[in-house]
């Protein structure tokens, strides 16, 4: 995983927000409308807390409290833990893991500019793993092993892409018998 990425490069910039006096029913409708599972609670334009679907379930549904009579300020998680848009991913991963935080509002110059979620970080990690796998495949150990015209036991033919129990180096490519024979007949 690339750990030197600043949060501004992976954060979601459109944050669903609500006011301290918004009731939970309104907040839930807003969350559904924007297909998110949390809402950042603002006071005078600054983040004061966060309410998640889990908060609504545990604080209202489990206690059989009517959501239309409860304000966000009464169920929000406070103090809100935030990050800076300049923070590095490696630091934020530690902060989120240490605090068991799934969503982290991102602040710049005192203003809410985005939010980063654990799934955003997993997405970056997944993309990096895919890129690394492609690079590893590109640089098969042929240079290290000193294979020139020798065969290898098993692998993927670099011409047709099929698995073969025996590959042979030909013109810088590891080829199955069929593709090697085809290249030999073209010469």
Image: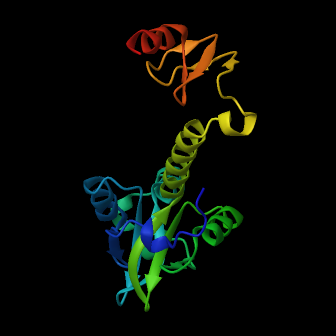
> What percent of the width, then of the height, locates residue 160?
43, 18
Would you place residue 179 above or below residue 79 in this image?
above
Would you place residue 159 above or below residue 126 in this image?
above
> What percent of the width, then of the height, locates residue 17?
34, 72
Which is nearer the eye, 55 or 118?
118
Q: Do we see residue 74 in this rendering?
A: no
Would you place residue 37 above or below residue 133 in this image?
below
Q: Quadrant of residue 186?
A: top left
Q: Residue at x 33, y 67 (%)?
A: 16
Query: Which quadrant of the figure contains the C terminus?
Result: top left
Q: Residue at x 61, y 65 (%)?
A: 3
Is 112 on the left or on the right of 29, as rendered?
right
> What percent of the width, then of the height, locates residue 155?
61, 20
| Residue lying at the far left of the rendered structure | 33
Q: Quadrant of residue 73?
A: bottom left
Q: Residue at x 35, y 87 (%)?
A: 45
């Amino acid at each position: 995983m690339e750990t030197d990425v600043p949060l501004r490069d992976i954060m979601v910039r459109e944050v669903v927000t609500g006011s301290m006096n918004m009731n939970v029913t309104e907040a839930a409708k807003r969350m559904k409308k924007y297909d998110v599972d949390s809402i950042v609670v603002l006071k005078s334009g600054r983040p004061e807390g966060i309410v998640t679907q889990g908060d609504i379930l545990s604080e209202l549904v489990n206690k059989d409290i009517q959501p239309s009579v409860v304000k966000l300020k009464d169920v929000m998680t406070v103090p809100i833990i935030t990050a800076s848009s300049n923070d590095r991913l490696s630091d934020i991963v530690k902060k989120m893991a240490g605090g068991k935080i799934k969503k982290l509002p991102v602040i710049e110059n005192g203003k809410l500019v985005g939010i980063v979620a654990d799934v955003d970080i997993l997405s970056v990690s997944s993309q990096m793993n895919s890129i690394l796998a492609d690079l590893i495949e590109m640089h098969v150990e042929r240079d290290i092993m000193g294979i020139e015209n020798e065969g290898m036991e098993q692998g993927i033919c670099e011409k047709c892409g099929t698995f073969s129990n025996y590959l042979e180096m030909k013109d810088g490519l590891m080829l199955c018998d069929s593709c090697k024979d085809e290249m030999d007949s073209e010469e």
